[in-house]
Amino acid sequence: MIKFGPSGNCEDFYAAGFSHTEQSAAFVKGLGLDCFEYSFGRGVRMTDEKAASIGKAFADAGVEISVHAPYFINFANPDDEMAEKSFGYVLDSARMAKMMGGKRVVFHPAAQGKATREDAVRLTIERLKILRDLLYENGYGDMIICPETMGKLAQIGTLSEVVEFCKIDPIYTPCVDFGHINAREQGSLKTVEDYRDRLQYMIDGLGFDRVKNFHVHFSKIMYSAKGEVKHLTFEDTVYGPDFAPLSVALKECGLEPYIVSESSGKQSKEAQEMKKMYFGA
């Protein structure tokens, strides 16, 4: 079933006097939401005890948890030692996700750097094959590992690149950030057809069953000629994209993804808005 929830804690969470991630479970549930994404953006720094405590809180609330691996992952780094660190970041994130009772790990695939685009993508694919083997060897074969579409032109992570990454193995499922796609493509997502074309592209490349419950990040995003600049809220009337046509396209395609709001400071409120929009569309 389709799920909606926030990435991290919103301004209202802290305004209500809450501070611990364990409290996020009941907070999110109380808003009628279904999921929550915990970010290890600056590094995987959590004790096993804390992960277990968070996992119990979310299990008790019946809210599904996912994690975002550290932002500085780069599988196109020509330095093998740095690539080893990237493997470690994903494995550590998977370990913590499992301890929290989650199954999904989102990660940023790579940056182009000084390499040609083709060489950077080729090296990323080689490294993701190694990562696949490491995940299975370490007992994470039941996890859903999600390479994300990226918003800056210098980053590896177009929709077509992410689909190619996911063809490596069923352990990989796309994380499609529609705000990122809209930013790197300078406002390309406007109509139901715009969204349906992207969804059908994934289905054609990976098959319906692989795509049915894919991972989504959604927010409006300011962009420049180089792509993503910063996350906005639904109040913005300049940049987009809008969620309403996506909700229609998802229904038309029969897809039920895990939708995470990354709106600036208003993640939970706008996750609620998307859920209401979807079930009213």
Image: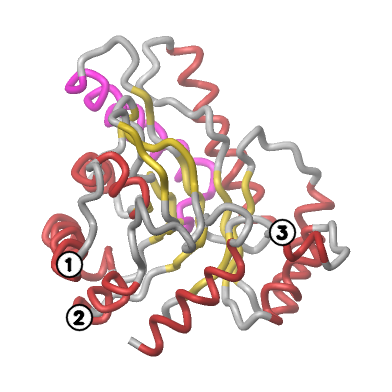
- In magenta, the rendered stretch is 117-143
Decide: is 150 above or below 130.
below
**Residue at 21% in and 22% down:** 117
What amino acid type is highlighted by mark number 1? Arg
Which mark, by number, is residue 11?
Answer: 3
Q: Position of residue 79 (x, y in %)?
A: 43, 10
Mark 1 highlights which residue?
Answer: 196
Label 3 crowd (10 A; few <14 / some 14-19 / many >=20): few
Q: Are the residues flagged by discs 1 and 3 in contact, CB closer than 8 Å?
A: no
| Of callouts 1 and 3, the N-terminal one | 3
Q: Is residue 58 magenta?
A: no
What amino acid type is highlighted by mark number 2? Glu
Q: 11 left or right of 203?
A: right
Q: Which quarter of the picture shows residue 29?
A: bottom right
What amino acid type is highlighted by mark number 3? Glu
Q: Who is closer to the viewer here, 59 or 150?
A: 150
| Circle 3 or circle 2, nearest the eye | 3
Decide: is 147 above or below 219.
above
Q: The residue tagged with tag 2: helix, strand or loop? A: helix
Q: Who is closer to the viewer here, 26 or 277?
A: 277
Mark 2 highlights which residue?
Answer: 252
Q: The residue tagged with tag 3: helix, strand or loop? A: helix
Q: 30 left or right of 34?
A: right
- Could you tell me if residue 173 is visible in this image? no
Q: The residue tagged with tag 1: helix, strand or loop? A: helix
Q: Is residue 142 magenta?
A: yes
**Residue at 32% in and 75% down:** 247
Kindly report the secondary structure that dominates the magenta region of the rendered protein. helix
Q: Are the residues flagged by discs 3 and 2 in contact, CB closer than 8 Å?
A: no
Q: Position of residue 40 (x, y in %)?
A: 64, 42
Q: Are the residues flagged by discs 2 and 1 in contact, CB closer than 8 Å?
A: yes
Quadrant position of the C terminus in the picture: bottom left
